[in-house]
Image: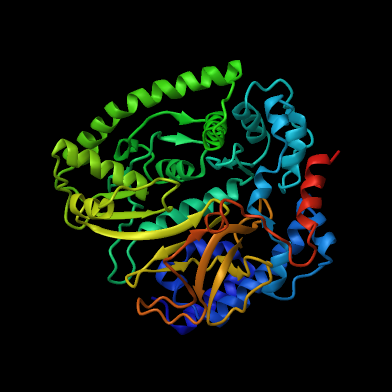
């Protein structure tokens, strides 16, 4: 770990070169004093706001609406944060009617890249539309799986992919005496029980980045349950069907949707067989090897259940590591689910907390707390008024995130997560700075399915912002 002078040198360099965060060691990242980090974060935030306001139309519009021309404190981020719903504020009819020009104009309000001269007419699908944008710009959009009939389009780009890969490596590696695995040499089998091995969804995009950035030439060391690419069109159809099911409505599919549904059905029919192959290839045949097992709680449970049913004992090397997070994703676990996971996978298990809106993930520690990487600003606001809460003591509320390494979009988001932050820090694991309590829930669940975000400074600001994005000429 760096000494005091070396840490001061890091901070000085970061003021001029924020990307230096990515070349620092993880112990050094968490050894910097919190007052110095907070001062640094504010300075970098002020610079990023000045750089991105002229380039991101939605940011410029919102800043004008709330009357902020310069950021003076972290609190100024709150009225400038985009609601997490902003990335699905497009017109569903534009998707249904393949009005790609209108969708491109909507997306252009959220992106720092010029999308004005891209030929998108005639694209035959959502995926084809996004591929044309990717071919013409550094944008690399990712999508959510969608819960209310619409998927999101987060216009990340190449700079965010660079930080995302480094973030992934940080969340797997060891810290102090805590277990972990450094994947950088590409030798450790990387096991991820995902139903595909690539795709538009944000989580599998991270797996793609690890495969291409670490395992190039050794892709056979990356194990997933399914194969193939899951497109944005498949995510959109799945979201549409989930919404209809939740509302008890019948749904009529278009001809293109019927073709997609057929492909998805064929993939789903193959999944039981694929799970059998996965258990054989990633568990039985890797007996005695040290592995990294990474997935959502739901996925780890499904693999544990499959092993139990098949009578397979997991006999990886004792220093294998499991990394997980992501909540339940609407899955209802049966009684005893956690005990089953612990029985089948008796290995070190560490939790993570992240989201597609930021590359600054929070890493679980030996004290069962979650420590955010310092290239991301975290803030907590009142969930009912969106007023900023004090950055001291223990505060519970809606989480706001800002990514200091993001340059492709305005990376400030009011999330849908209810968190508790201990700003005073002092964790026994040795990491400096504030941390989250590992008790994170969705505000929509607290509010009976509704998560209406109010803007503290101008109540109608978000409604007008969405209207602006939809009607830009």
Looking at the picture, tell me which residue is in the foreground, 164 or 107: 107
- Residue 291 coordinates in the image, percent (x, y): 25, 49
Q: Give how far across and how far down residue 364 sits, in percent.
A: 38, 65
State whether residue 105 is above or below residue 315: above
Quadrant where the image shows the C terminus: top right
Q: Residue at x 28, y 33 (%)?
A: 275
* Residue at 57%, 51% in the rendered image: 449
Q: Residue at x 74, y 75 (%)?
A: 72
| Most foreground residue, 416 or 359 | 416
| Residue 128 seen in this snapshot | yes
Residue 151's spot in the image, x, y percent?
59, 39
Give the vertical position of 439 relative to 389 (above or below). above
On screen, residue 264 versus residue 142, left or right, reads left
Above or below: residue 72 compared with residue 105: below
Q: Is residue 72 above or below residue 467?
A: below
Residue at x-position 22% and y-position 57% = 347
């Amino acid at each position: 770990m760096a000494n005091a002078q070396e840490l001061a040198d890091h901070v000085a360099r970061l003021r001029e070169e924020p990307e230096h965060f990515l070349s620092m060691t993880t112990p050094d990242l968490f050894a910097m004093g919190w007052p110095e980090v907070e001062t640094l974060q504010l300075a970098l935030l002020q610079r990023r706001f000045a750089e991105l306001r002229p380039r991101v139309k939605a940011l410029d519009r919102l800043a004008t609406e709330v009357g902020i021309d310069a950021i003076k404190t972290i609190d100024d981020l709150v009225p400038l944060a985009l609601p997490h719903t902003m990335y699905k504020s497009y017109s569903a009819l534009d998707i249904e009617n393949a009005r790609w020009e209108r969708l491109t104009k909507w997306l252009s309000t959220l992106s720092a890249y010029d999308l004005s001269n891209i030929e998108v007419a005639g694209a035959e699908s959502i995926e084809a539309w996004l591929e044309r944008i990717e071919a013409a710009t550094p944008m690399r959009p990712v999508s959510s799986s969608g819960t209310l009939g619409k998927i999101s389009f987060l216009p990340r780009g190449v700079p965010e992919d660079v930080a995302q890969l480094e973030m992934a490596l940080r969340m797997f590696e060891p810290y102090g005496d805590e277990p972990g695995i450094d994947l950088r040499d590409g030798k450790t089998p990387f096991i991820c029980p995902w139903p595909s091995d690539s795709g538009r969804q944000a989580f599998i995009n991270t797996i793609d980045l690890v495969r291409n950035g670490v395992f190039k030439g050794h892709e056979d060391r990356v194990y997933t349950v399914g194969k193939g690419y899951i497109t944005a069109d498949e995510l959109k159809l799945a979201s549409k069907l989930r919404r209809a099911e939740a509302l008890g409505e019948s749904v009529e599919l278009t001809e293109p949707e019927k073709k997609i549904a057929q492909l998805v059905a064929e993939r789903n029919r193959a999944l039981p067989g694929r799970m059998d192959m996965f258990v054989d290839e990633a568990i039985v045949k890797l007996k005695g090897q040290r592995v990294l097992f990474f997935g959502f709680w739901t996925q780890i449970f499904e693999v544990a259940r499959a092993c139990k049913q098949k009578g397979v004992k997991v006999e990886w090397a004792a220093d294998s590591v499991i990394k997980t997070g992501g909540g339940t994703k609407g899955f209802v676990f049966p009684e005893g689910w956690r005990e089953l996971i612990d029985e089948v996978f008796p290995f070190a298990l560490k939790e993570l907390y992240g989201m597609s809106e930021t590359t600054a993930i929070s890493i679980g520690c030996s004290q069962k707390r979650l420590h955010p990487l310092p290239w991301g600003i975290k803030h907590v606001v009142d969930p009912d008024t969106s007023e900023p809460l004090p950055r001291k003591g223990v505060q519970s509320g809606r989480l706001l995130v800002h990514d200091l390494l993001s340059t492709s979009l305005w990376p400030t988001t009011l999330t849908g997560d209810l968190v508790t932050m201990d700003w005073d820090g002092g964790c026994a694991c040795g990491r400096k700075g504030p941390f989250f309590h590992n008790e994170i829930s969705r505000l929509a669940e607290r509010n009976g399915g509704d998560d209406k975000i109010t803007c503290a400074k101008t109540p109608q600001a978000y409604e007008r912002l969405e209207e602006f994005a939809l009607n830009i000429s």
